[in-house]
């Protein structure tokens, strides 16, 4: 069973497919991995085999990727750089948004006079209407109606 697992992982099978190939559920697979990570026998040897096979697969894939890159395949080079050094080479699809949140606790008192109710309402509206202050962030400026 361990030999078949090693072969399947080296081929690139997902854990759920590798589990099905040896006749266990994905939940059982995860339990075995957890127990193996804790060093419990016989699961520790299963876990070690999975880790070794993943490392072998990674080495084989990187070897093939390097071969393709050495033959001028720019997509292979970009792929390796994006995955191995994402902080420098990955596509920047994420936008960092900063927001400030204020809690407004309002106790409603039905005996308040109309003037007091209106004053509280105006205070709340004034707080909600304040723009987010960040002159260095063009996205926030745009959101606040400024085109700096």
Image: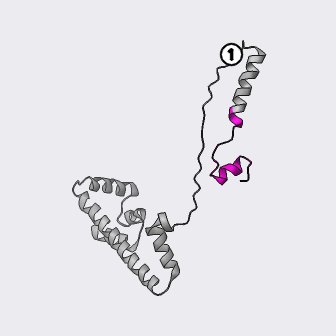
| Quadrant assignment for the N terminus | bottom left
Residue farthest to the right, as pictured? 114
Residue under numbered circle 1 = 109
- Residue 137 locus on image (x, y percent): 63, 52
Q: Is residue 16 left or right of residue 38?
A: right
List x then y, in percent, for residue 95. 59, 56
Q: Which residues are magenta?
A: 127-148
Whether 137 is among the magenta residues is: yes
Classify 122 as above or below 22: above
Whether residue 109 appears in this view of the structure is yes
Q: Is residue 142 above or below residue 108?
A: below
35 and 87: which is toward the camera: 87
Q: Is residue 35 above or below residue 52?
A: above
Position of residue 124 relative to residue 98, above or below, is: above
Name the image quarter holding residue 62: bottom left
Decide whether residue 131 is among the magenta residues. Answer: yes
């Amino acid at each position: 069973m361990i030999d078949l697992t090693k072969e399947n992982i080296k081929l690139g099978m997902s854990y759920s497919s590798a589990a099905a190939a040896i006749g266990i559920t994905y939940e059982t697979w995860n339990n075995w991995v957890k127990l193996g990570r804790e060093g419990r026998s016989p699961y520790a040897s299963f876990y070690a085999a999975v880790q070794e096979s993943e490392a072998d697969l990674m080495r084989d894939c990187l070897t093939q990727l390097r071969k393709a890159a050495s033959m001028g395949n720019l997509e292979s080079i970009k792929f390796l750089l994006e995955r191995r050094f994402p902080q420098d080479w990955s596509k920047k699809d994420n936008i960092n948004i900063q927001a400030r949140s204020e809690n407004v606790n309002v106790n409603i008192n039905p005996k308040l006079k109309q003037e007091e109710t209106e004053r509280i309402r105006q205070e709340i509206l004034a707080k909600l209407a304040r723009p987010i202050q960040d002159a260095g962030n063009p996205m926030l400026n745009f959101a606040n109606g400024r085109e700096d």
